[in-house]
Amino acid sequence: MSAFENFGKRETLSDDDRMECGICWHVYDPADGDAVWQIPPGTAFAALPEDWRCPNCDALQSKFMRLGDGR
C-alpha cells in the first residue's frame, strides 16, 4: 500500500508508525510525541485524541499518511 492509499486509516497503523501531514509535511513521530498539544512521547498516532490536529497547519488527522519504513 502506498502512503497516499493510507490517508487517515488509523486501523492499519503500528504503534511506532510515523505519520506525515499531506498539507505541510510535518511529521508526527510517536517517539517524540507533540509538545504543542502536550502529547507525551510514546503516544501512537492511533491513540491521539480525536480533536488532535497538525500542530503546524491545523490539518485534520485524516490528512496524514504513514511514512515508509526508511527511517
Image (tube, rainbow, N blue to C red):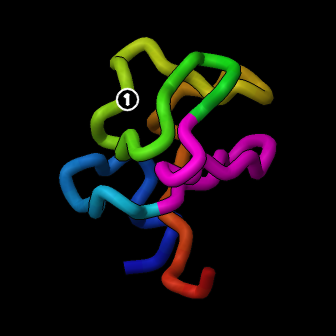
Find numbered disc 1 in the image and state the secondary structure of the residue it sits on: loop
Q: Which residue is at the far front?
A: 41
Q: Which residue is at the far top?
A: 51
Examine the image and state in which quarter residue 49 appears.
Answer: top left
Number of marks present in the image shown? 1
Left or right: 43, with 57 as reference point: left
Left or right: 65, with 24 as reference point: left
Q: Tag 1: Cα neighbours inside 10 Å, few (<14), some, or many (≥20)? A: some
Q: Which residues are magenta?
A: 18-33
Image position of 25 with respect to 51: above or below: below
Q: Position of residue 1 (x, y in %)?
A: 36, 79
Left or right: 61, with 15 as reference point: right
- Hey, what amino acid is under mark 1? Leu
Q: Position of residue 65 (x, y in %)?
A: 51, 56
Q: Which residue position holds label 1?
A: 48
Residue in the image at 77% along x and 26% along y: 57
Question: Magenta span: helix, strand or loop, mainly?
Answer: loop
Q: Which residue is at the far left?
A: 11
Does 59 appear in magenta? no
Does 25 appear in magenta? yes
Identify the image quadrant of the C terminus: bottom right
Residue in the image at 19% along x and 51% along y: 11
Image position of 66 with respect to 27: above or below: below
Q: Position of residue 10 (x, y in %)?
A: 28, 47
Residue in the image at 30% along x and 56% along y: 15
Q: Position of residue 43 (x, y in %)?
A: 38, 40
Residue in the image at 50% along x and 69% along y: 3
Image position of 61 with respect to 64: above or below: above
Examine the image and state in which quarter residue 50 appears.
Answer: top left
